[in-house]
Image (spheres, rainbow, N blue to C red):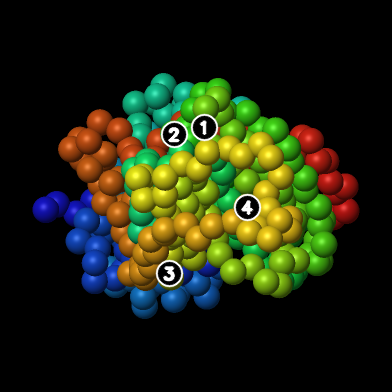
């Protein structure tokens, strides 16, 4: 199998610890790290040690004119995702850009158009769609095992604070832009990216962050005849016990990303329908009684092997490879899907304008 030559921009937490952890690891037989673009000299020198045979560059524009690059991964700062990706597309490069795809729908749509106009391919790194827990949860939701699903809660919460660039509005940061593409994307996925999806409530705030961006985010959205999606991403929940809960008319599925899952449900026919009793309920002595019963239920539980950061990353890169080589006509997670995520984020920020202090 022919390896594709890859250039990666950025050796921060994402570029080095997510992308290159896979690309330089034993599971990757699809890509060759040809170029590493990093403005920091220490990180450039470290890249030469970590990724044997690569060349290092200090600016992405040094890629221009090079004919031996099959795909450029843009893992730069969030505020640079749009301008750098657009420049690369206009210079004839296939590009995969990190999340967030852009700061608004306009930027996303412009990148999609730019890729089309220049005859190149565009992808967005939303690896949670390939994570074992999401694939399992999606299958459960669609299976009918827990009945007609009415609500999905997705929680990416904790009790913590940050003080880095990801706390500043001017850097297109905050919990909703940084973490949000994962739970919001999954929520839209549970709705099958229904084009009639509407955002019905949002609230953003800053609580513990040292910056001016949000570290509290509550977003509700739904689509006709689809579940209510309830998203939370915040820093003031000291007792967050799960990441994902799906509630249907026959039971509940709950899981923690990259860890455990459990499910409790009833089966048709095992709990016959009880007729409605209009009179006041009473016990055998005539005393008031409460209608209660012990339902026949079933429980399942298990653990997941792998997470969005290992299996999810590998599977996304495998999907990208098939797309780049023509084995597939489209990506599993398309740029249009990623643009829908940004639409929700854009609406949340428009409805909750935070004061810029930096």
Q: Is residue 28 above or below residue 26?
A: above
Residue 181, above or below 51: above
Query: N-terminal of the two: label 2 or label 4?
Result: 2
Near mark 1 (Cα within 10 A), the count class, few <14, some 14-19 or many ≥20, is some
The answer to whether the residue labelled 3 contacts the one labelled 2, judged by CB atoms less than 8 Å apart, is no
Task: Report the residue marked by disc 1.
Answer: 226
The numbered mark, 3 or 1, whose residue comes first in the sequence reads 1
Q: Residues within 10 Å of mark 3 (few under 14, many from 20)?
A: some
Q: Which comes sooner in the sequence, label 3 or label 2?
A: 2
Q: Residue at coordinates 68% horizontally, 53% vertically from top-left?
A: 282
Q: Report the Cα–Cα distance between label 4 and label 1.
A: 31 Å
Q: Residue at x 71, y 45 (%)?
A: 280
Closer to the observer: label 2 or label 1? 1
Q: Label 2's element?
A: loop
| Between 229 and 346, the one nearer to me in the picture | 229
Mark 3 to mark 4 CA distance (whole Å): 34 Å
Left or right: residue 67 versus residue 343 is left
Task: Check disc 2 and report the residue beneath it.
Answer: 192
- Position of 3 with respect to 148 (left or right) is left
Q: Give the secondary structure at mark 3.
A: strand
Could you give the CA–CA distance between mark 3 and mark 1, rounded to whole angstroms?
26 Å
Per the image, label 4 sits on a secondary structure element best described as loop
Which residue has dot 3 on it?
Answer: 260
The quadrant of the rendering that contains the C terminus is: bottom right
Q: Residue at x 22, y 56 (%)?
A: 30
Which x, y percent locates residue 270?
A: 36, 50
What kind of element bears circle 1?
loop
Label disc, if present, on residue 291 of the rendered structure: 4
Residue 128: x and y in percent read 44, 53
How much space separates mark 3 and mark 2, taking CA atoms? 24 Å
């Amino acid at each position: 199998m022919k390896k594709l030559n890859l250039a990666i921009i950025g050796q921060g937490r994402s570029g080095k610890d997510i992308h290159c952890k896979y690309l330089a690891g034993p599971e990757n037989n699809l890509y060759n790290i040809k170029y590493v673009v990093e403005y920091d000299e220490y990180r450039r020198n470290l890249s030469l040690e970590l990724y044997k045979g690569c060349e290092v560059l200090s600016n992405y524009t040094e890629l221009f004119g090079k004919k031996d690059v099959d795909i450029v991964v843009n893992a730069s700062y969030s505020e640079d995702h749009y301008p750098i990706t657009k420049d690369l597309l206009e210079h004839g490069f296939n590009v995969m850009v990190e999340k967030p795809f852009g700061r608004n729908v306009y930027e996303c749509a412009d990148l999609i158009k730019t890729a089309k106009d220049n005859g190149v391919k565009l992808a967005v790194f939303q690896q949670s769609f390939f994570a074992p827990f999401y694939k399992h949860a999606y299958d459960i939701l669609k299976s009918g095992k827990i009945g007609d699903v009415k609500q999905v809660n997705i929680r990416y919460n904790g009790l913590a604070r940050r003080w880095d660039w990801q706390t500043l509005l001017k850097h297109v940061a905050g919990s909703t832009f940084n973490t949000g593409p994962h739970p919001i994307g999954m929520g839209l996925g549970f709705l099958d990216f229904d084009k009639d999806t509407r955002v019905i409530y949002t609230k953003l705030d800053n609580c513990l962050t040292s910056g001016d961006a949000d570290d509290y985010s509550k977003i509700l959205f739904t689509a006709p005849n689809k579940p209510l999606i309830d998203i939370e991403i915040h820093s003031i929940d000291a007792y967050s016990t799960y990441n994902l809960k799906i509630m249907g008319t026959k039971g509940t599925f709950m899981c923690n990303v990259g860890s455990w899952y459990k499910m409790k449900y009833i089966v048709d026919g095992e709990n016959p329908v009880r007729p409605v009793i209009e009179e006041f309920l009473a016990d055998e002595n005539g005393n008031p009684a409460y209608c209660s019963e012990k339902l026949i239920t079933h429980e399942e539980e298990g653990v997941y092997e792998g997470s969005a950061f290992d299996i999810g990353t590998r599977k996304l890169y495998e999907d990208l490879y098939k797309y780049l080589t023509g084995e597939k006509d489209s990506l599993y997670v398309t740029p249009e899907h990623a643009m829908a995520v940004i639409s929700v984020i854009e609406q949340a920020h428009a409805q909750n304008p935070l004061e810029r202090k930096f």
